[in-house]
Amino acid sequence: MEHLTEKRKMTIMIAIIASMFFAAINQTIIGIAMPRIIAKLGGMEYYSWAITIYLLTSTVASVLIGKLSDIYGRKPFILTGIGLFMLGAFLSGLSGDILHLITFRAIQGAGAGIIMSTVFTAIGDLYEPRERAKWTGVMSAVFGLSSVAGPLLGGYIVDHLDWRWVFWIFLPLGILAFVLILINFPKVGKRQGESVDYLGSLFMTLTIVPLLLAFSWAGDGPNKYAWGSLQILSLFAGAVVALALFLLVQTKVKSPMLPLGLFKNSVFTVSNLVGFFLNAGMMGAIIYVPFYVQGVKGISPTMAGYVTMPMSIAMLLTSAFVGSFMSRTGKYKKIAIVGLALMTGAMVLMYFMVPSTPLYQLILYMLLLGLGIGAAMPVFSLTVQNAVKPQQLGVATATSQLFRNLGATIGISVMGSLMSAAIGRKMTEMSAAAGAAKPAVPSDPALAESMALFSNPQNLLDQPKIEAALKGLPAELQPVFESMLNTIREAMSYAISTTFLAGAIIASAAVLIAFFLKEIPLRSSKAMGQKVVQVHAERKSSAEG
């Protein structure tokens, strides 16, 4: 690789940021628009698959590409990732039914996994850790920006435009990123003496897929299986067997896809464990905050976007500040622990919320949560990269992404099960108490039809339906309906608070593990260009030899 000028590095970073933003905002836009899309396409029973398949292909692709990018260089895989993501997004907009959408989301997920795995590694190729810290903060801020703009834009699109534009609106940005990387990103020759670990890749895939399916399918509700069912236990058993075979293969092959020796590095191991628990706790909280805002407080989706905005802005600003701080000082451990502790504390406070909790108090708690997440998130990808050899950047970054994805999936699934169990338990308790205490409610067909809404607490998220049901009742029956509405909201508040407590417990594990992180000062070098030249000169010499 030729020596890169600072101007060319900046051009490459603009392309990388555009790629990351392209992938991130597509997800935040789709998240809020998906219910409307499903309403148009039908197939509500397959709704979870549109999310699960994306996560599956993204996770598998990210970990498989890590080692390959170490061998062949980042450029072809970044381009492949952007290309697949654009193809999946374009085809998703053409979907005629839910099965089409699931298929095309699988393509999109594979592209996203490749993008996420390679862009952070590419930063490691361009900059030393001290300089890299600043860019890691910027990349984390990109996620914050997408989480601010995405929900607002997604809501606007499905309300005022055809839903297909949710997938198409940012395709020009993807094309721009593709062209910039194609022109500016340097090409690297194949590293000699390395071979692709096909058997290890197979068993890694056979470990991840059943594991994620088990956690996605387990729980209460339609299209779910009990945790102790044969289906779920079989998936777990298959994952364990595949993992054992994967570990065996990694000790035998010449060039393993995941060198097990990396886990002897305490910084690598501790950082990945923190990343796992951080994402498990964080995603549980972030996923269920909108449920609380819309279901318990009765706020419309459009207004809910504004209520959650302070959390996203706090994440954005804090991530950028932390990146700059680490770049100046080379230190990170204390700020990571403070961020994790702040995140844990915010979720503890959210556990004590009730339906009567003032809205400003909820916003304050979410602001604290955003500050904590923004402080902790940029740190642990950087610590992994700082602790390994440059030749292992790809596989190390991909492994970090794998642990985070597993944490997010498992966290969401476990908290979803906790929420379903809690709301069922609370509803039973409150129904028994109400049945013993109150007089019989007058029998009325309109009231019975309206009360049927509450057979599924998720109807609380459809405010227009609730308002229409209330207005359709005679004035004398409206207080009965409102009383039941408050009862259901109280049950949902109790259930969601349970998930916040679970998230706090999981996040506290991340805090404790972070204390064992060995702080290695971030390397700084004014001669990064010469180092890059030396590494790739060795590759070239090896290739010619």
Image (cartoon, rainbow, N blue to C red):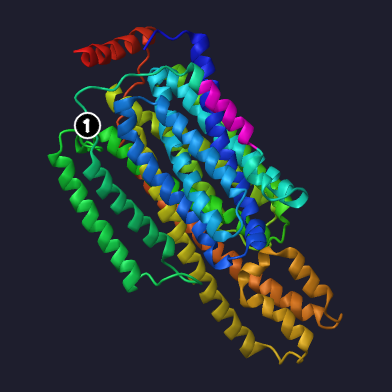
Query: Which residue shows up at 54% across the image and 48% down it?
Result: 346
Which residue is labeled 1 in the image?
A: 195
Q: Is residue 263 above or below residue 509?
A: above
Q: What residue is drawn where x is 51% and y is 72%? A: 222
Name the quadrant containing residue 292. bottom right
Q: Is residue 271 above or below residue 408?
A: above
* 242 relative to 522, above or below: below
At 33% from the left and 43% from the top, the residue drawn is: 273
Q: Could you say which is closer to the camera, residue 521 or residue 236? A: 236
| Mark 1 residue type | Ser
Choose between 295 and 50: the one closer to the eye: 50
- 338 inside magenta stretch: no
Magenta: main secondary structure equals helix
Quarter of the rendering occupied by the N terminus: top left
- Which residue appears at 14% of the width and 41% of the height? 251
Q: Where, by quadrant of the figure, is residue 211 drawn?
A: bottom left
Q: Can the viewer see residue 60?
A: yes
The quadrant of the picture occupied by the C terminus is top left
Q: Nearer the viewer, residue 24 or 98?
A: 98
Position of residue 239 measured from the top left corner of the image (x, y, whole percent): 28, 57
Residue 94: x percent and y percent? 62, 50
Q: Which residues are magenta?
A: 170-181
Q: Locate residue 326 relative to residue 388 in the image: left or right.
A: right
In-image side of 183 versus 36 (left or right): left
